[in-house]
Image: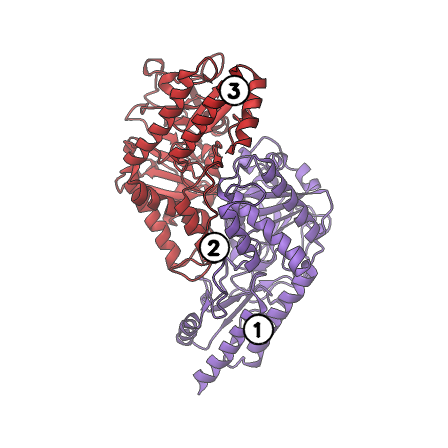
Chain colours: A purple, B red
Amino acid sequence: MLPPNDPNRHNFSGGPGALPRSVLEQLQEAIGAVPEVGLSILGVSHRSDWFAAVVSELEANIRQLLGLPENYHVLFLQGGATQQFSMAPMTWLRGKKEAADYLQTGYWSSKAITEAAREGPLRVLWHGEAGGFRRLPQDEELEFNPAAPYLHYVSNETVEGLQFHRIIGRDDIPRICDMSSDFLSATGPFDKFSLIYAHAQKNLGPAGVTVVIIKDQLLQDAPRDRLPAFLDYHQQIAAHSILNTPPVFAIYTVLLVTRWLRDEIGGLAAMAEINAAKAAALYRLLDDHDDFYIPRAAKADRSTMNVVFNLQSRQREQAFLAAAEAAGFSGLGGHRSIGGIRASLYNGLERAAVDNLIDFMADFRRRSLA
Amino acid sequence: MLPPNDPNRHNFSGGPGALPRSVLEQLQEAIGAVPEVGLSILGVSHRSDWFAAVVSELEANIRQLLGLPENYHVLFLQGGATQQFSMAPMTWLRGKKEAADYLQTGYWSSKAITEAAREGPLRVLWHGEAGGFRRLPQDEELEFNPAAPYLHYVSNETVEGLQFHRIIGRDDIPRICDMSSDFLSATGPFDKFSLIYAHAQKNLGPAGVTVVIIKDQLLQDAPRDRLPAFLDYHQQIAAHSILNTPPVFAIYTVLLVTRWLRDEIGGLAAMAEINAAKAAALYRLLDDHDDFYIPRAAKADRSTMNVVFNLQSRQREQAFLAAAEAAGFSGLGGHRSIGGIRASLYNGLERAAVDNLIDFMADFRRRSLA
C-alpha cells in the first residue's frame, strides 16, 4: 500500500524522525480498520478492552526492551519533554530547601533548567564552556551534592550532537534523565535511573506522546493531591495513562515500533550495533576530510544520534544544504540556534540512507575543491 | 485504499468519534507520503514551511467556520480539555479575591470545577438536582455575579446528553466554554465567548490535540511569565502552537476535517441541519416508544450529539447492548458513571448509520415485547 521506497529521499531531520516502513504499512491498514477491532484506529474507544491491552503490552515491551524490573512504572503522557521539564520539579523540587543538581550541557538541558528554576532551588553543576557546548564534563569536573533531591541531565543533546556514553551521578541520589533523543537506541543499565522521560518523535513514534518511566521508590516520595490531576504522576499511574483521553493513535504507533524493535531488529543490543555502525561510518568521513567537514563535538562525546558539523563558511554550508535537498536528503540544516549541518540517524533511518549521504558528501567535497 | 464501507459496522461511541471517509483516505496516503512534501506525515519536520502553512490554514479555517473576527487567537494544544480545566483558572483565577462563576450541569463540568477549585475562588451557580443531571437551568434560576473574573460552563454534557441551546451569561463577563463535544456541530454566534476550548476526538480529529480560541481582550488580562511555558497562553500564541513539537499528525487531521466541513458539507449551517435531522429521527423513535425506551434528558435540553436513554431494567439494557454489538453498532454503552444507553451522533457519523440504528431499535422492541 505504501508508495515504492524512493532510495533518493531520506529524512535526516532532528525530529520528527523517520519510522520503519513495516510500521507505516500497519498504520495505513489501521486507519482503515484495526484488524482485531474492525474500526479505524482514529475511532476506537480509549476505554475499550482492546486499547487497555495495547497499553498493557506496550508497558511490558518497554520494560522488557530496557531490562527493567517490575518496580518501574511506565506512563504515556502528552506535552512532550517540555511538560516533564516542569512536571518533575513541580513534584520533587517544590518546597524543598536543598537544591537539585542540574547539568547544562546544551540547548535542551538549558530549557529544562529554565523551567525547573520556577519550581524550586537548583544548582547548575556544569555550564559548558566559552565557545558553546562542544564537549561534556568529565567525572572529575563534577561534584555532586550528596543531599540533592535529585540529579537531572540530558543523555543526548540533539542540537550540539553531544551524548553521554556513561551514566553519571551517585547511586544514592535519584537520577532523572531526559532521554528524548536516544531512548531505545542502545542498551542500559537503565535501572540506575529513577525517572526517564522521552518524547516519541525521534526513535519511537509520532509527536504527541511521551514515555515516562518511574521507579517506585521515587514515586513514593511524590506528594499526593497537590497538583492538577494531569500533572500528578500518582493519578496518571493509577489510571494506566488513561486518566483522560490519551493520544490513541500515537500510543498504538509506539506499540508497533517496540514490536519492530523486538521482532525485526532483535532487541536493543542489535539496534545499538546498527546505530553505532551508521554513526561510525559518517564520523569516519568527517575525520578523513576534516579540511572540509569540521565535526563540532569532542570525539569522546560524539552522539550516535546527531552528527553535527560545519563547513568552512556559511556560504558553503548553504550551498551544501541546497545540493543535499536537491539530491533528496531532507532536514540536514542545523538547529536554528546554532546553524551548521546536522545529520540525525535515529533508529528508523536505514543504513543505506547513511551510505547514500556519505557518497553524496564525498562527491560534494570533490566538486567544491575542483 | 480503504476497505469497502461496511454498512453494518458503525461507531456510536461517546468518543473518539468516527471521522469522514474522505479524511481517512487522505490520511492513509499521507502516512506513505504527504503529496506536497514527499515524506510521511509521521516524519515531516514541525519546523518546515509546509507545517507552518498547515497551522496557518487551520487557524483561518476555524475562524472562518465559526465566523470569528481577527481579534481571536486560535491554538492547538496537547493535554485535552482536562488541561484546560486547570490552565484557564491558573491564568485568570489564581490570586483573585472575587469568585468565578461555574455551572455544574453534569459529569464533565464537575471535573472542571474540581480542578478549578485548586486554583482560586469559585462559586457554583447550579448543582443540578436530586436524581442526577436530567435538565439544565433556566435563565431565571441563574444569578450571575457581575464582578466574576469569568463564567465557565460546558455547552454539551456528553455523559448525560444535555446541551445548552442558547448562550448564557452576561456580555460584560468573559464567557469560558468547554465545547469539546459539540464544537463545529452547529452555528454560533461564537463571538459572544472569550475562551472556547474543544478536544478533537468528537467532531474534529483524533485524540491528542485540543483547539483553544481566545479573544484578544481576555488574553491581555492574562499575567505574563508566571506559569511554565507550556501552560502560558501568551507563549503558545506567540509560537503559533509550535512552542515545542506539536502533535503534527493530529493537527493535519483536523485541517482535513475543516476542509471537509467547508467543501464537502458546505459549512456549519449545513452541518447543523444534518446533525439536527439525525438527532430528531432518533428522539422521535424514543418518544414514539417511551413505554420501552426512556429518554434521560428533559426535552428542552436534549443534546443533538449524545442521545441518552434507558430501558426498563438493567437486564434488558444488557440484552440490548449485546444485540446491538452483534448487529455492528459499536460503543452504545452509556458512560461508566451512569450506565444506560448512549448513541453519540458526531459530525462524522452518517445519517444512514442513524437510520440503521433506528430500524434495529424498532425491531429489538418488537422482538422483546413479542
| Camera sees residue B99 | no
Q: Are marks 3 and 2 on the same chain?
A: yes
Up/down of A34 relative to B364, above or below: below
Q: Which residue is mark 1?
A: A282
In front: A291, or B297? B297
Q: Is residue B264 left or right of residue A246?
A: left
Up/down of B51 relative to B223, above or below: below
Up/down of B230 relative to A367, above or below: above
Q: Which residue is mark 2?
A: B31
Q: Chain of mark 2?
A: B
Q: Chain of mark 3?
A: B
Q: Are marks 1 and 2 on the same chain?
A: no
Q: Where's residue A44, x and y in %?
A: 52, 39
Q: CA distance from mark 1 to mark 2?
A: 29 Å
Identify the amino acid type marked 2. Ile
Q: Residues within 10 Å of mark 3 (few under 14, many from 20)?
A: few
Identify the amino acid type marked 1. Leu
Q: Secondary structure at mark 2?
A: helix
| Camera sees residue B326 | yes
In front: A370, or A291? A370
Residue B353: image quadrant is: top left
Label 2 near label 1: C-beta < 8 Å? no
Q: Where's residue B336, x and y in %?
A: 56, 26
Label 2 near label 3: C-beta < 8 Å? no
Residue B367 numbered tag: 3
Identify the amino acid type marked 3. Arg
Q: Chain of mark 1?
A: A
